[in-house]
Amino acid sequence: MDDPTPADVPVSAGSGFPPRRDLTDGVVLLRSPRRADGPAIVAGATDPEVVRYTVVPSPYGDEDLDKILQIADEGWSAATDAVFAVCDAARPDELLGLIGLHGVEMGLEPGGRAEVGYWMRPEGRGRGLMTRAVVLATSWAVHELDLAVVTWYAFVGNDASRRVAEKAGYTLEGTLRRGAKHRGRLVDSWVGSIVAEDLRG
Ligand SMILES: CC(C)(COP(=O)(O)OP(=O)(O)OC[C@H]1O[C@@H](n2cnc3c(N)ncnc32)[C@H](O)[C@@H]1OP(=O)(O)O)[C@@H](O)C(=O)NCCC(=O)NCCS
């Protein structure tokens, strides 16, 4: 579908993200990524499961680290990307994972849209932290960015990611045959979503 013409754009369009703040439920903490997180980000980005199931660059160089920190910073200002470090709330300085809302479009009718993506370092897995992070980030996006829908994609067979998305309230919509590009290959992709009504009841 074509992008709306200016006359179609609701008056709220163009409003940016709210000021950055930490999000927490007391167990997991989402905060702004920072330069000191560099070694932890590189460790996560080069983990074999992250390489297998995401489009994070591989091999992962200094320029890739610079780029994700730049996206975290400039994407917030441009209201296109909201990237958070995922931490145990008891150890807020230790980045265990990353979660991002990407391709954010605000001001649509009946609300905006975005795509969620995430990875967790092995030492953080299996504790329910990413599920909590997805719940927090999605709720923040729906309520504070006024998104109408957040979409999730995963390569078919990524059962851990699917379990996280479904536990966080996303509904599996189906399979896109050859729906994703992974390191030069077309692979089948699951797609799921959560809509604002799912959260508002
Ligand atoms: C997906 C990922 C973020 C999950 O992080 P996490 O912190 O372990 O997530 P949680 O602990 O909140 O929940 C994981 C759930 O998946 C389940 N799980 C883990 N591995 C699984 C597998 N191979 N098959 C099925 N379920 C699996 C866990 O048992 C748990 O479910 P449960 O609470 O019902 O027991 C992490 O495994 C990861 O980083 N993977 C590589 C990168 C990736 O796939 N990112 C997503 C791309 S779409």
Image: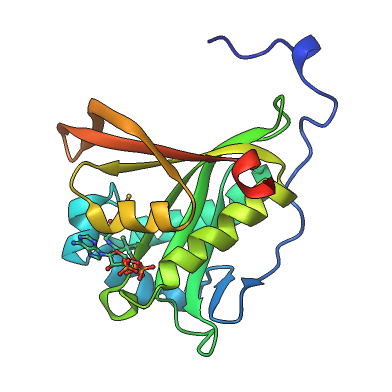
Q: How is the image coloured?
A: rainbow
Residue 20: x and y in percent read 71, 62
Observer-nearest of 53 and 6: 53
Do we see residue 48 in this rendering? yes
Residue lying at 44% horizontally and 56% vertically, measured from the top left: 68
Residue 116: x and y in percent read 47, 47
Do we see residue 59 in this rendering? no
Observer-nearest of 70 and 120: 120
Count of marks placed on residues: 0
Residue 105: x and y in percent read 62, 33
Residue that lies at the very extreme toward the front in this rendered image: 201
Please tell me whether residue 166 is drawn above or below residue 28 in the rendered image. Answer: above
Residue that lies at the very extreme toward the bottom in this rendered image: 90
Observer-nearest of 59 and 110: 110
Residue that lies at the very extreme toward the right in this rendered image: 11
Residue lying at 76% horizontally and 59% vertically, measured from the top left: 19
Residue 1: x and y in percent read 53, 10
Residue 128 placement, left or right of 57:
right
Residue lying at 50% horizontally and 65% vertically, measured from the top left: 133
Please tell me whether residue 28 is drawn above or below residue 60 in the rendered image. Answer: below
Residue 198 placement, left or right of 14:
left
Please tell me whether residue 169 is drawn above or below residue 29 in the rendered image. Answer: above
Question: Quadrant for ligand 1?
Answer: bottom left
Residue 58 placement, left or right of 22:
left
Residue 191 placement, left or right of 197:
left
